[in-house]
Image (cartoon, rainbow, N blue to C red):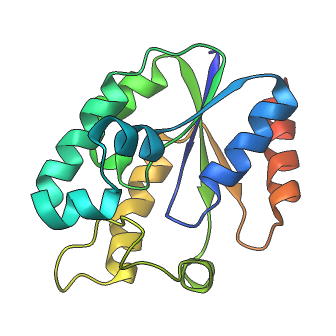
Amino acid sequence: MNNIVLIGMPSSGKSTVGVIVAKHLGMSFVDTDVLLQTQNNRRLQDIINTDGIDKFLEIEENTVLSLNLCNTVIATGGSAVYSEKAMKHLKANAIVVYLNINMKTVKRRLRNIKTRGVVLSPGQTLEEIYQKRKPLYEKYADIIIDSSENSIDETVEAIIEKLDF
């Protein structure tokens, strides 16, 4: 296992924490959302608005499947867990860390849901997404870190401690 994959809800800290974990451990860092945007030359929300959710999820899956990385911390998009194929690809060479936050924390942190690129079907609530994704995050996680009340530094320390590198 030479990669670390971070999964979790939008606003759980995957990107922010991932950069710091990579720095601490002397690893590279990749954010699949940023990679997806760069490869498609469009923001996540623009892809969702223009092409629809199904196409976005297909693009996200293909982006993840295209990864062939070593010694890298990978922050995934919150919806990456919808693709079993993508998650199996990631898990083949990684420890998967689920940054678990409670719904209260999601609501407090996630202020730009309409522009952030969150996969939200018309009429679907944030609570419904949370309930749908939570079991998937738990299914794929090798390590679960409850970071609802943690600072960024506390979450980084908890990850490094659990990894026992």
In-image side of 134 versus 5 (left or right): left
Give the quarter of the image for residue 105: bottom right
Q: Residue 119, image x and y in percent?
A: 29, 65
The residue shown at (63%, 23%) is: 72
Residue closer to the observer: 128 or 80: 80
Quarter that holds the C terminus? top right
Up/down of 70 relative to 144, above or below? above
Q: Residue 135, image x and y in percent?
A: 41, 57
Give the quarter of the image for residue 59: top left
The residue shown at (13%, 62%) is: 50
Q: Residue 120, image x and y in percent?
A: 27, 72
Q: How many marks?
A: 0
The residue shown at (39%, 52%) is: 136
Give the quarter of the image for residue 2: top right
Quarter that holds the N terminus? top right
The residue shown at (42%, 68%) is: 116
In-image side of 160 versus 101 (left or right): right
In-image side of 97 versus 42 (left or right): right
